[in-house]
Image (spheres, helix red, strand yellow):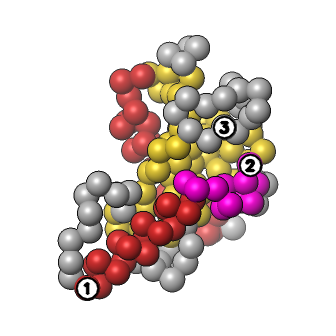
Amino acid sequence: MKRVYSYKPSQFVDGSAYANVKLSLIQYIVCKNAGTAYPSSDTQWHELGEGFWTWEQTNNSLDVNTPVEERHDLFTCENSQTNPELKASIIKDPQKGNYRGYLYNQKDSKLTFVRTFEMDQLEDAKNTLRVLVAINKDKNDEE
């Protein structure tokens, strides 16, 4: 697996996984405003201040030479008026028996490797990458 993947927004925004994330956010917000229950079987959105975040599982490949068996993408929204943005990905590496965590840099349109996680650490990987996304956001806001 590569340490850096070029991943332009057009590559994921035009895909069905992104469409599902966007539609599920709209449904989540409508249900929240209407005071009705959001289906638990759908993408699970979480609130953080005015923003939202979710992990979406997909099997979209980042490289034609390396098909992906399992990938999880972290999407966030600043508020209910903004579109979901890709922030991080976790890719299963079946050859090495682990997960690899990547942060997404929107400016450079690249997913960059940050850490390897054991197979039984998927939830830890998700939590770690969410924290790294928050740290990087704060760092970028100061510049």
Q: Amino acid at mark 1?
A: Ala
- Mark 1–mark 3 CB contact (< 8 Å): no
* Badge 2 or badge 1: first in the primary sequence: 2
- Residue 14 figure quarter: bottom right
Residue name at image x 28 percent, y 78 percent: 32
| Image-based side of 61 in relation to 50, left or right | right
Residue 8 on image: x %, y %: 76, 54
Tell me if residue 14 can be seen: yes
- Residue 69 figure quarter: top right
Residue name at image x 44 percent, y 36 percent: 125
What segment is highlighted magenta in the picture?
7-17
Main SS, magenta region, reads helix
Residue name at image x 76 percent, y 32 percent: 64
Q: Residues within 10 Å of mark 3 (few under 14, many from 20)?
A: some
* Badge 1 or badge 3: first in the primary sequence: 1
Queried whether the magenta region covers residue 9, the answer comes back as yes
Q: Secondary structure at mark 3?
A: loop
Q: Quadrant of the N terminus?
A: top right
Of tags 2 and 1, which is closer to the observer? 1
Q: Amino acid at mark 2?
A: Tyr
Residue 49 on image: x %, y %: 37, 74
Residue 28 on image: x %, y %: 35, 72
| Relative to 80, residue 20 above or below | above
**Residue bearing mark 2:** 7
**Residue bearing mark 3:** 61
Q: Quadrant of the C terminus?
A: bottom right
Q: Secondary structure at mark 2?
A: loop
Queried whether the magenta region covers residue 92, the answer comes back as no
Cα distance, mark 2 to mark 3? 10 Å
| Relative to 32, residue 112 above or below | above
